[in-house]
Image: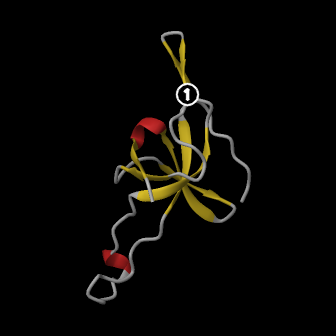
Amino acid sequence: MASIKPLADRVVVKAQEAETQTASGLYIPDSAKEKPQRGTVIAFGPGKVENGTKIDMTVQEGDTVLYGKYAGTEIQLDGEDVLIMRESDILGIVND
């Protein structure tokens, strides 16, 4: 994957694949799949400066995170779809 260095408090997230099958075994068609709200951090910026104080990033590369349904901007990076969003759009880090 191409190297990208987000600026300020932005994070690049690779979304996890949407579920293709329900718990009971039914297959979900592409038109009915929900947009994933979980992904893996692949890059993050240095943080931001607020009122003269540097605020470091909370997330790290490799973290699995939850984010809002409409968070971020989709971009293509080496043919893969990824999201770039502000750290504040991330709702939490999943401890697997």
Would residue 43 appear left or right of 32 to someone viewing this image?
right
- Crowding near the residue tagged with mark 1, few <14, some 14–19, many ≥20 C-alpha atoms within 10 Å: few
Name the image quarter holding the C terminus. bottom left
Seen in the picture, residue 30 relative to 70 is either above or below; the reply is: below
Q: Quadrant of residue 22?
A: bottom left
Farthest residue to the front: give it: 96
Q: Say above or below: 32 vs 90.
A: below
Q: Residue at x 69, y 46 (%)?
A: 4
- For residue 88, above or below residue 82: above
Spot occupied by residue 44 in the image (x, y as percentages of width and height)? 60, 41
Give the residue at the far left of this rendering. Answer: 24
Q: What residue type is labelled 1?
A: Asp
Vertical position of residue 87 compared to residue 77: above or below: above
Q: Which colour scheme is used?
A: secondary structure
* Quadrant that contains the N terminus: bottom right
Q: Where is residue 20 in the image (x, y as percent from the top left)?
A: 39, 81
Q: Mark 1 points at which residue?
A: 56
* Residue at disc 1, secondary structure: loop
Left or right relative to 53: residue 23: left
* Quadrant housing residue 56: top right
Q: Residue furthest right?
A: 2
Is residue 54 toward the left or the right of residue 95 in the image? right
Who's the residue at 60% across and 48% down the image? 61
Instruction: Locate residue 11, reporting x and y percent.
Output: 55, 43
